[in-house]
Image (cartoon, grey):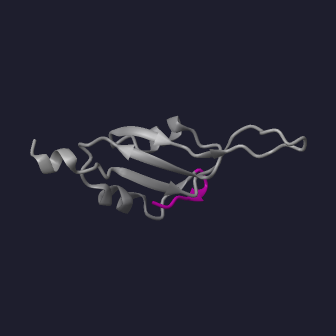
Amino acid sequence: MSAETATTPSNNKLYVGNIEYSTTKEELKELFKDYSIESIQIPTRSPRTKNGKRGTPKSKGYVFITFAPEVKDLDSIIKKFTDYEFKDRKIYL
């Protein structure tokens, strides 16, 4: 492994927007099953209830998927899922 390779950060993370709020990590793993996934992050927010306490966390409607280093061509994933409908919503990458 060269020094350049060792210090170059991995850029295998994709933003996937407009997902249905109830989408689970398992559903996303199934959707992207043809690619090795390292991690899936579903950002959430906890809205305040009427008494000012934090409520149940809810998805913000987008995720970040980090693919394994052996997944070299993210462009092919983007092309495959352009205009793709998932759970009655067109997702954006």
Image quarter hosting the N terminus:
top left
Q: Is residue 64 left or right of residue 53?
A: left
Q: Position of residue 72 (x, y in %)?
A: 24, 51
In the image, is residue 8 part of the stretch drawn in magenta? Answer: no
User: Relative to 90, does residue 50 appear above or below in the rendering?
Assistant: above
Which residue is drawn at the image coordinates 45% and 60% (left, top)? 93
3 or 71, nearer to the observer: 3
Look at the image and say whether residue 88 sits in the magenta stretch.
Answer: yes
What is the x, y in percent for residue 31?
Answer: 45, 44
Q: Residue at x 69, y 40 (%)?
A: 57
Q: Is residue 73 left or right of residue 45?
A: left
Question: Of all residues shown, which one is farthest toward the top?
Answer: 26
Q: Which residues are magenta?
A: 87-93
The image shows residue 48 at horizontal and vertical percentages of 80, 45
Q: Residue at x 35, y 55 (%)?
A: 77
Residue 76 image-quadrant placement: bottom left
Residue at 31% across / 60% down in the picture? 75
Prevalent SS, magenta region: loop
